[in-house]
Amino acid sequence: MNIGIIGLGLIGGSFAKSLKKNTNHMVFGFDIDGQSVDLALKDKSIDFKLGTDDLLNIDLVILALRPKDALRFVKENKNIRGWVMDLCGVKKNISKELEYLSSRNNFEYIGAHPMAGREIGGYTSSLDDLFEGASIILTKRNIPNEILDILSEMGFSLQYCDADTHDRMIAYTSQLSHIVSNAFVKSKVALKHNGFSADSLKDLTRVAMLDESMWTELLLENDYIKDELDFLIDELKKYSDLLEKRDEKGLELLLREGKERRILMYPGGVK
């Protein structure tokens, strides 16, 4: 199979490296940053630089781009054939548009989202084992076995849901975490933490190191993130009110509820 990867940043570069490490498929790569393409060729994580004329011969096009850029690429390249898989972190809106484009043009669409990443981006941060043990969310079930086998060989576990469910869940599991982390580091005492902090602070603040341009687009594209954020604000207000009242029993109960919910989330514990 000829696989073309559009975008050789952290995710696209890791996809390329994982494909070459774990499969025997031919990998073509494209990025507007020519240096990333040159590095990928040097690393042998891609076999060839992808030109737009090559798209006619690509069996699987992987869009490792932001939502707007992914749509723009497909609209500008009507000679795409075969299968198109986007890896965007939101699905509801882009899936509608790519499904529409697939019905007008001659390709099949797969919505996908690999649940893996790092707080640093770019091709030089990409890893050949980034996806080992990670899930990949797929919004389509009738996918050729050859493509499913490729994803499994890369180390993914397969998770299926519709695009609306994807965005509703990701608003909580990913996007809210990034907002909380990004806001948390703005405390007046944050820069004085040395000697007063341990792993809990590192864990909570890790994803504050985000790409603000990309995350702005992702947050504005998700219809459910504001609901999750508003719910969290309401929950935090409960803690604030109990502290103001110095309500020992109420605060203990609230903390216990959170602990018990965490146990339910990970009944086998976290290693």
Image (cartoon, rainbow, N blue to C red):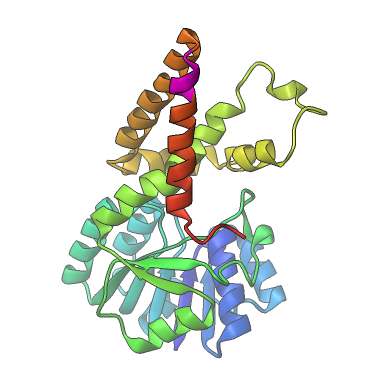
Which residue is at the front of the view, 25 or 203? 203
148 part of magenta stretch: no
- Answer with left or right where residue 236 lies relative to residue 203: left
Query: Can residue 58 be seen in the rendering of this structure?
Result: no
Residue 120 location, x and y as percent?
Answer: 64, 50
Residue 12 location, x and y as percent?
Answer: 53, 65
Which residue is at the front of the view, 185 or 212? 185
Q: Give the range drawn in magenta.
A: 247-251
Which residue is at the front of the view, 261 or 122? 261
> Looking at the picture, does residue 218 appear above or below residue 105?
above
Q: Which residue is painted at 41% across and 53% down in the image?
A: 89
- Answer with left or right where residue 2 lies relative to residue 41: left
Q: Which residue is painted at 32% across and 33% down in the image?
A: 226
Query: Can residue 136 be seen in the rendering of this structure?
Result: yes
Q: Which residue is painted at 48% across and 60% down in the image?
A: 115
> Looking at the picture, does residue 14 appear above or below residue 241?
below
- Answer with left or right where residue 259 lies relative to residue 142: right
Q: Which residue is painted at 59% across and 67% down in the image?
A: 14
Report the quarter where the N terminus lies.
bottom left
Report the quarter where the C terminus lies.
bottom right
> Looking at the picture, does residue 110 appear above or below residue 153?
above
Residue 84 location, x and y as percent?
Answer: 34, 72
Residue 93 location, x and y as percent?
Answer: 26, 51
- Answer with left or right where residue 109 lies relative to residue 268: left
